[in-house]
Image: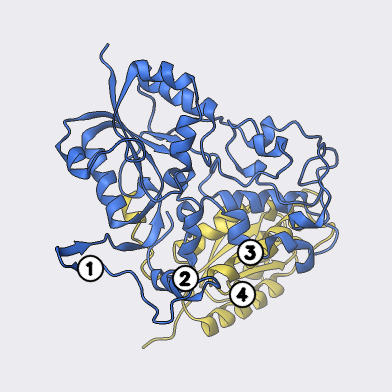
Chain colours: A yellow, B blue
């Protein structure tokens, strides 16, 4: 059997991490292709629903990338709000039985292309250790009715 | 105009919604001029075969969630007969508090209830069985389903009235709408389109909070916003229409009004908490004491209808 390849949804802030991912590309730093990047204007825009929805629909991990605290955020403190939300979401995921490590928040600035590729590689490795998202199996019973 | 024929059914709930209907007091007499209740197990002596033999109904009002086969069967039967189906109360709209049992499997739940609670003496671990052999013949019990579900999961719902139980004002509005016969759009919620905070009269000053404590830790200030006092209040994530009665009685909102224009009430609350909690330092776990049981705190009434809606060891679930 081929090795498990995790499916990752990444929410990247427009001003730092998305530009950082771009930098990784232009500087030819390789990172695994497991990531689907969704550009958001700020990590403060990442509604907790996005994370739950991604996990429910079968993402093995969610990666949120934003500007360095305390003061890099383009919108003053969106990154810090995201930090609070991620912390509470991890408590919630733990109680549901989902490993909280499947949700990762990293600070990556626009110049840190190499950092971006390293963090993604780390996350992919970690998810390979954890295996597939346990919510993936048989989560269709009610959604079929919609 | 002939009277509306109305059936009221009590699915998996506590019966508080039936009492809630009576809570409209004298106004009920006005209501009864226009409606004729033909089926109401809690108030009249009817058998299910009477319901099956009834011709078509105008309105079926269901309180309680879908917890066993009987609930599912009757709700589907009511749907097939009634022109309008009303989900009445938090259990019918969102699954209710019993939805918290979806964190574990059905077997886990039966084990907890019949073996593990401190007040249970059941050394042989007797569990309810589907079939019981009595001298007169075999008796059948409806089977408990794996998951607790809101009624919209088995039948199309026309009107939603949330609340535990729904406030009198909303019950009267429901009857007004039903008797006027105005068809509303799909998924019509009877209640406010704004949150409980909109109706709350408490004073909000700083809109920040250092920590989330449990209720018993604090003397409650009757004038100040609960969240600013460091207590979990579901107001920002909950549909209003209740007049923020709990808050007026100095109790934080528990969230029975249900979600408001979002797909997940708890997630919305997490979003709100993220904004008002202090952002200077990462929040320590100790500062989130009120969220020791995040599902119980953030999804008290709506876990069954939340996005994930189950523990990982349980199949199905969520929306």
Query: In this image, B283 relative to B53: left or right?
Result: right
Which one is earlier in the sequence, the residue at label 1 or at label 3?
Answer: 1
Q: Nearer the viewer, residue B182 or B178?
A: B178
Whether residue B221 is situated above or below residue A83 in the rendered picture:
above
State which chain disc 1 sits on: B
Same chain? Circles 1 and 4: no
Between circles 2 and 4, the one closer to the viewer is 2
The residue pinned by badge 1 equals: B132
Q: Position of residue A41 (x, y in %)?
A: 66, 50
Residue B123's image quarter? bottom left
Q: Position of residue B78 (x, y in %)?
A: 26, 39
Between circles 3 and 4, the one closer to the viewer is 3
Alpha carbon of mark 1 to alpha carbon of mark 3: how far?
38 Å
Between circles 1 and 3, the one closer to the viewer is 1
Q: How many marks?
A: 4
Q: Position of residue B40 (x, y in %)?
A: 32, 36
Alpha carbon of mark 2 to alpha carbon of mark 3: how far?
16 Å
Which one is earlier in the sequence, the residue at label 2 or at label 3?
Answer: 3
Alpha carbon of mark 2 to alpha carbon of mark 4: how far?
15 Å
Check disc 3 and report its element: helix, strand or loop.
loop
The residue pinned by badge 2 equals: B312
Alpha carbon of mark 1 to alpha carbon of mark 4: how far?
48 Å
The residue pinned by badge 4 equals: A101
| Residue ID at (53%, 81%) | A130
Check disc 1 and report its element: helix, strand or loop.
strand
The residue pinned by badge 3 equals: B293
Q: Nearer the viewer, residue B50 or B228?
A: B50
Between circles 1 and 4, the one closer to the viewer is 1
Query: In this image, B179 relative to A27: left or right?
Result: left
Same chain? Circles 2 and 4: no
Q: Residue furthest front?
A: B135
């Amino acid at each position: 059997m081929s090795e498990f390849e995790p499916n990752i949804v990444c929410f990247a802030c427009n001003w730092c991490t998305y530009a950082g991912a771009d930098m990784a590309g232009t500087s030819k730093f390789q990172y695994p292709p497991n990531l689907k990047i969704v550009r958001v204007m700020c990590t403060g825009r990442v509604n907790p629903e996005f994370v739950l929805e991604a996990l429910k629909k079968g993402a093995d991990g969610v990666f949120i990338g934003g500007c360095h605290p305390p003061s890099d955020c383009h919108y003053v403190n969106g990154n810090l709000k995201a930090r609070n939300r991620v912390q509470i979401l991890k408590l919630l995921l733990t109680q549901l039985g989902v490993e909280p490590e499947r949700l990762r928040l990293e600070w990556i600035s626009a110049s840190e292309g190499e950092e971006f590729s390293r963090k993604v590689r780390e996350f992919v490795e970690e998810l390979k250790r954890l295996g597939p998202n346990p919510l993936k199996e048989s989560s269709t019973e009610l959604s079929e009715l919609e | 105009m002939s009277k509306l024929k109305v059936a009221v059914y009590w699915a998996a709930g506590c019966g508080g919604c039936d009492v809630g209907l009576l809570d409209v007091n004298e106004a009920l007499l006005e209501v009864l001029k226009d409606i004729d209740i033909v089926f109401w197990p809690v108030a009249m002596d009817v058998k299910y075969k009477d319901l099956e033999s009834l011709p078509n109904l105008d309105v079926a009002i269901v309180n309680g969630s879908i917890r066993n086969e009987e609930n599912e069967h009757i709700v589907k039967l009511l749907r097939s007969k009634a022109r309008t189906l009303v989900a009445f109360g938090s259990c019918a709209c969102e699954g209710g508090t019993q939805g918290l049992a979806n964190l574990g499997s059905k077997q886990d739940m039966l084990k907890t209830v019949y073996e593990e609670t401190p007040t249970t003496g059941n050394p042989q671990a007797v569990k309810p069985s589907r079939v019981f052999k009595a001298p007169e013949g075999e008796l059948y019990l409806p089977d408990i389903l794996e998951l607790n579900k809101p009624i919209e999961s088995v039948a199309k719902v026309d009107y939603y009235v949330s609340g535990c139980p729904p406030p009198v004002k909303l019950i009267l509005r429901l009857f007004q709408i039903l008797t006027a016969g105005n068809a509303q759009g799909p998924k019509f919620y009877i209640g406010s389109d704004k949150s409980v905070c909109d109706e709350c009269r408490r004073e909000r000053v700083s809109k920040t909070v250092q920590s989330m404590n449990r209720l018993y830790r604090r003397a409650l200030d009757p004038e100040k916003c609960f969240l600013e006092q460091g207590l979990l209040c579901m107001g920002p994530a909950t549909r209003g229409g209740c007049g923020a009665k709990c808050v007026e009685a100095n109790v934080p909102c528990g969230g029975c009004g249900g979600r408001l224009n979002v797909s997940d009430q708890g997630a919305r609350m997490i979003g709100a908490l993220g904004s008002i909690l202090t952002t200077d330092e990462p929040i320590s776990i100790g500062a989130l004491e009120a969220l020791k049981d995040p599902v119980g705190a953030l999804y008290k009434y709506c876990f069954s209808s939340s996005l994930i809606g189950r523990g990982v060891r349980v199949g199905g679930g969520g929306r």
